[in-house]
Amino acid sequence: MTETIPNAPPVNRQTASHILQRLGESGQPPEYGVELINVGNESYLTVLEEEYFQRQLKGGASFKLVQGYFGGGKTHFLYCVRDMAWRHGFAVAVVELSPTECPYDDTLKVYASVARRMAVSTDGPGEPPRFGLTDLLRNLVDDEVDKATRAIREDGGERARQEARHQVRRWLRRQVARTPCESVSFRKAIVEFCLAWLEEDFEREQRLEAWLRGEPIPRGEVRDYGIYEQMSRANGFLMLRSLTQMMTGLGFAGTVLLFDEVDRNLSVSAKRSQVIGDNLRQVIDLCGRHQLPNTLFMYAVPPEFMRTIVPDYPALYQRLKTPVPLSVRSPQAVLIDLEQLDLSAQKLLTQIGQKLVPIFNVARDADLDLERQSANAETMAAACVNTQFEVNHRRLFVKTFVDFLQLQLIDGEKDVDLDDAIDLVLDGHEALSATSGGDEFADF
């Protein structure tokens, strides 16, 4: 069953179910299909599309700082940018930064996280993304062989598959192997891994996969393949730069790296804070010098980051401080401020709810009245805004509204008044507080 959602492409049941599950269960943005419920940030996305993906990123690089409170839509926005980048043929990694799993001051962990999360667009609608640099390379080699095989058969050539594999091998050795790359070892690892997969050399493939993923492997295990560097915290950032350089050599439009600060606690030590500041300054400078070819680098933080951390580092502060955020009038600005959206809070929640109704119908194979439930969405949005003073109330709204639609399906449709809507919102708030351990509003 497929229903058309206003101002959005058709949605299949698998995608609709995924969206509903993510929003109703955790209040977090869906892994795919986020554009179906996106509202309020279109002006930012339009500037990124027209100024960067269609122009700047075809040869240069750019750094953007995304600012928003926890629960204010940072992760949601990064997913929107990711989907846009996929449509333009970019390889994308969305990485969650945290002091333990992936601290930004540990460049090796940052590189390894990027390698694990790297992905390109999938073929079929609603098909979940496939993550990982090495799987991306495997799929690329297979696609190149398939494409060459079809071309040879159309020309009437014989032994098409064998000849296609020969052509891809030659492409890897003569073109990809000559891609300008700061780390010769990294370039060699990419080429040798692709050749190992093409030639079905399982042992070589496994060793090179471990190295490319940033996993510990003795240097002697890969020395025979021309790889003389060992990944470490000392060269993790070099490897990250080399990764972006090799993506263009492999035929991708470029690379988009999206870093999401997911931990509320910004009180890191002065030493670690200094390293984080230095790394960000370095990235900004590299983008300006085009050492990250065709690369968009985004770093999402809460507003406290600019107020309490950045001012301690004048070199970084000078690069990030801007009188106005990114907009049509200032497309070159470094700051994307998610506290300045196209819609008021109530209109934003109302439109999210209105987009959720047809998605719910598809996911549940239901037939809820769109007009009635759109009016209910407006009432629920008003209740949420009037009873919650936090800016990050989207999670509360989407979880409550998905539960409300389920009740409408089970008990029968009816109009909800403001008093009943307020009761539902307050009940939802208590439930979130009880289950979240005080961290009430994860990013949406």
Image (spheres, rainbow, N blue to C red):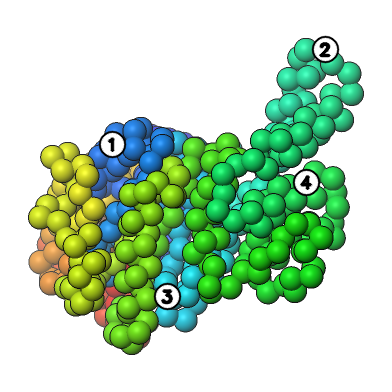
* Element type at mark 3: loop
Taking the image as shown, residue 340 lies to the left or right of residue 17, namely: left
The label number, if any, that marks residue 156 in the structure image: 2
| In the image, residue 221 above or below residue 270 | above
| In the image, residue 189 above or below residue 403 | above
The label number, if any, that marks residue 105 in the structure image: 3
| In the image, residue 393 above or below residue 32 | below
Amino acid type, callout 1? Glu
State the CA–CA distance, disc 3 to disc 1: 31 Å
Mark sitting earlier along the chain (3/2) = 3
Mark 1 crowd level (few <14, some 14–19, many ≥20, 10 Å Cα): some
Amino acid type, callout 4? Leu
Q: Of discs 2 and 1, which sits in the foreground?
A: 1
Residue at 82%, 12% in the rendered image? 156
The label number, if any, that marks residue 382 in the structure image: none
State the CA–CA distance, disc 3 to disc 2: 56 Å
Amino acid type, callout 3? Asp
Mark 2 crowd level (few <14, some 14–19, many ≥20, 10 Å Cα): few
Residue at 58%, 73% in the rendered image? 232
Residue at 23%, 73% in the rendered image? 313
Mark sitting earlier along the chain (2/1) = 1
Residue at 43%, 50% in the rendered image? 291
State the CA–CA distance, disc 2 to disc 4: 26 Å
State the CA–CA distance, disc 4 to disc 1: 37 Å
